[in-house]
């Protein structure tokens, strides 16, 4: 029988507590600590452009993590995630400007507001599934987009709204290097929260609803509650990510939150791996970095073959878009379980090398 | 009486799946339902576990009527079941599958679950893990504890499903063909588990099974259904001797029966 355990030979656990550690082996724990330390030191080590990319990966990663709870864990679908992401951005700016609550607190509060909205739009999930649910969530995308465009009191209408920068104890996080730490803080909290959710009662219930809802119900799981709860949790992370995004740019406008972004969120979790926490971050990094990489690549090719590829120069922008589409298709064909699965396979073969089992 | 079924009828369109079926199951009994395919055995279990709502009649459990009670509230009362066609959570590990059975006994919600180390979720998980390990020991599935349920063989999956139903800690466990598709050895193991559940763990068992040898050996009482109607219930020997049962199900020489 194929084992999926990453535990090295001879690493025996003598208590159930030790068996349920989040970081399964000592080396995984060491690497995680190292990675967190490196991330903490990153602004001092890499240049500003890379820091700004890392901020984007963190922000989109938080939102994608939410979508992964809904799609990957609970097996539902949402084509309106970008609208919730946008709602979080507007809510935080609105809360801050109308009530004067410091931005540091309006960011999670915006998450809560988005939770409420997400649960309302998630209500159809109590009754419908699959394609029908996809269309219902598509409606939420367009309803919210329309709301952003018309509700002047909330979003500033077509002119958008200003989002103040975050200030902690009078210390403004006004540069990328400073804002990075706020994003890192929320990203780490979100990652640990979702990883913990997965190994506790309600996380298992969500997966049970996905895998076999009939027997989940017989096991005492309230299907309606968990289907709507999944929308709620997913919207919280969307709103949190959106709020961080709004205050990062300093200006929120409705144009950024179209269905294209919703589909990009779906692409992130499909490429990363449905239901996988680390996969979500890998997938997000992939989607954020792929256009950058393609740009650098085509730019480099143009430098080397300026004449032969002259036609390419005008099409550079399209190549970026097309590469995302191609990546999704290739992943669906060759690695439908996502990057997380690929990483696991690599680790397994590495662990067993040079023997096949 | 632990379970009382009174004049239950159920129909799907023009098909009468159950006609006026009444029976009762006593505390700590091992009760079997047999009958030809399409006799309404699984429909009967579905009525008890809440998948179907009977058109008429009443089902009482511990003296309390089950009508109008949602399926997901029935484990709280003490009703657990397994399914005829495997109904495991295929992408979860065996351990997680069984832990889902503890769902209704656990109190943590998604917030305390996310704050695993701070809100008592860890403590609760470990407590239930201990109970689940007892069940794993009992059903001898230690070696597949961390395997993903969908990758297991048929016989093992059936056993994991039984483990999940036991984890609900039910007073009444409904087993829908626990031995279907098994070889002799697996059947013997399964029969022993069912008897142990009944005798050691004190659970009342209602079982649907086609293997007459097993049914006659381990059941305390047997009920026969045919075309949705009850033919007879009673001690295994009495049921075996019934002429109608022989004709409808066990198969007797027609000449002899006539």
Image: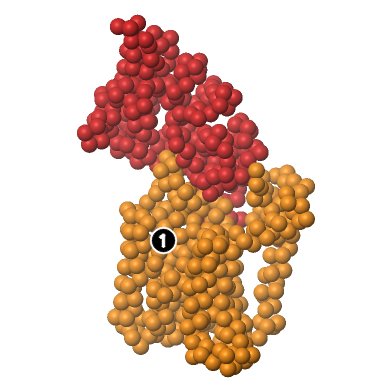
Chain colours: A orange, B red
The relative height of residue B87 versus residue A51 in the rendered view (above or below) is above
Give the residue at x 32% y 31%.
Answer: B65
The residue to which callout 1 is attached is A77
Q: Residue at the far front: name it.
A: A308
Is A335 or A69 nearer to us in this picture? A335
> Does residue B146 appear to the left or right of A150 in the view shown?
right
Give the residue at x 57% y 72%.
Answer: A286
> Does residue A315 appear to the left or right of A117 in the view shown?
right
Q: Residue at the far bottom: name it.
A: A307
- Tag 1's secondary structure? loop
Give the residue at x 64% y 62%.
Answer: A343
Using the rendered image of the protein, determine whether residue A150 is visible from the camera's viewpoint.
yes
Image coordinates for residue A125, horizontal then vertical, percent: 35, 57
Q: Residues within 10 Å of mark 1 (few under 14, many from 20)?
A: many
Image coordinates for residue B170, horizontal then vertical, percent: 47, 32
Q: In which quarter of the image is the N terminus of chain B?
A: top left
Give the residue at x 55% y 33%.
Answer: B155
Using the rendered image of the protein, determine whether residue A17 is visible from the camera's viewpoint.
no
Using the rendered view, name the quadrant where residue A174 is placed.
bottom right
Is A156 or A73 nearer to us in this picture? A73
> Does residue B94 appear to the left or right of A229 in the view shown?
right
Q: Mark 1 lies on which chain?
A: A
Using the rendered view, name the quadrant where residue B95 is placed.
top right
Q: In which quarter of the image is the C terminus of chain B?
A: top left
Image coordinates for residue B157, horizontal then vertical, percent: 54, 37
The relative height of residue B201 versus residue A263 in the rendered view (above or below) is above
């Amino acid at each position: 029988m194929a084992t999926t355990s990453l535990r090295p030979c001879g690493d025996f656990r003598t208590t159930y507590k030790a068996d349920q550690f989040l970081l399964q082996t000592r080396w995984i724990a060491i690497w995680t600590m190292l990675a967190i330390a490196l991330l903490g030191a990153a602004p001092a080590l890499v240049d500003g452009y890379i820091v700004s990319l890392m901020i984007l990966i963190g922000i989109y990663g938080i939102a994608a993590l939410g979508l992964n709870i809904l799609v990957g864990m609970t097996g539902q679908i949402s084509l309106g995630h970008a609208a919730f992401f946008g709602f979080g951005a507007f809510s935080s700016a609105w809360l801050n400007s109308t009530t004067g609550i410091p931005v540091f607190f309006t960011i999670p509060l915006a998450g809560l507001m988005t939770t409420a909205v997400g649960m309302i739009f998630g209500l159809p999930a109590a009754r419908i599934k699959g394609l029908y649910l996809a269309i219902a969530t598509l409606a939420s995308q367009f309803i919210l987009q329309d709301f952003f465009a018309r509700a002047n009191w909330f979003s500033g209408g077509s002119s958008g709204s200003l989002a103040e920068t975050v200030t902690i104890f009078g210390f403004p996080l006004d540069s990328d290097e400073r804002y990075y730490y706020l994003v890192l803080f929320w990203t780490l909290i979100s990652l640990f929260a979702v990883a913990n959710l997965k190994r506790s009662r309600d996380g298992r219930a969500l997966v049970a609803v996905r895998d076999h809802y009939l027997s989940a119900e017989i096991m005492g799981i309230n299907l309606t509650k968990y289907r709507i709860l999944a929308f709620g949790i997913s919207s919280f992370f969307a709103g949190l990510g959106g709020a961080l995004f709004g205050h990062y740019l300093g200006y929120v406008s409705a144009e950024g939150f179209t269905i294209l972004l919703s589909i990009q969120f779906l692409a992130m979790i499909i490429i990363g791996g449905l239901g996988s926490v680390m996969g979500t971050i890998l997938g997000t990094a992939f989607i954020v970095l792929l256009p950058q990489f393609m740009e650098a690549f085509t730019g480099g090719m143009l430098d080397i073959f300026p004449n032969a590829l002259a036609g390419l120069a005008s099409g550079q922008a399209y190549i970026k878009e097309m590469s995302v589409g191609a990546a999704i298709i290739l992943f669906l064909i060759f690695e439908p379980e996502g990057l997380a699965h690929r990483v696991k396979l690599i680790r397994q073969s590495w662990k067993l090398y040079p023997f096949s089992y | 009486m632990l379970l009382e079924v009174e004049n239950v009828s159920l129909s799907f369109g023009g098909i009468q799946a159950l006609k006026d079926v009444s029976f009762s199951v006593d505390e700590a009994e091992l009760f079997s339902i047999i009958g030809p395919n399409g006799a309404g055995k699984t429909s009967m279990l579905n009525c008890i576990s809440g998948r179907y709502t009977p058109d008429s009649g009443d089902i009482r459990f511990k003296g309390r009527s089950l009508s109008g009670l949602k399926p997901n509230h029935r484990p709280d009362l003490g009703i657990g079941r397994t399914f005829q066609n495997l109904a495991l959570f295929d992408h979860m590990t065996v351990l997680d599958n069984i832990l889902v059975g503890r769902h209704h006994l656990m109190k943590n919600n998604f917030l305390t679950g996310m704050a695993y180390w701070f809100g008592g979720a860890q403590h609760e998980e470990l407590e239930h893990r201990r109970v689940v390990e007892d069940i794993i020991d009992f059903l001898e599935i230690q070696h597949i504890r961390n395997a993903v349920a969908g990758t297991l063989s048929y016989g093992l999956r059936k056993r994991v499903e039984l483990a999940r139903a036991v984890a609900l800690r039910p007073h009444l466990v409904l087993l829908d063909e626990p031995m279907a598709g098994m070889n002799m050895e697996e059947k013997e193991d399964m029969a022993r588990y069912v008897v142990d559940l009944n005798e050691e763990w004190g659970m009342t068992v209602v079982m649907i099974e086609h293997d007459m040898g097993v049914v006659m050996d381990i059941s305390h009482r047997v009920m026969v259904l045919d075309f949705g109607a009850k033919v007879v219930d009673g001690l295994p020997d009495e049921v075996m001797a019934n002429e109608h049962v022989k004709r409808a199900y066990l198969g007797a020489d027609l000449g002899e029966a006539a």
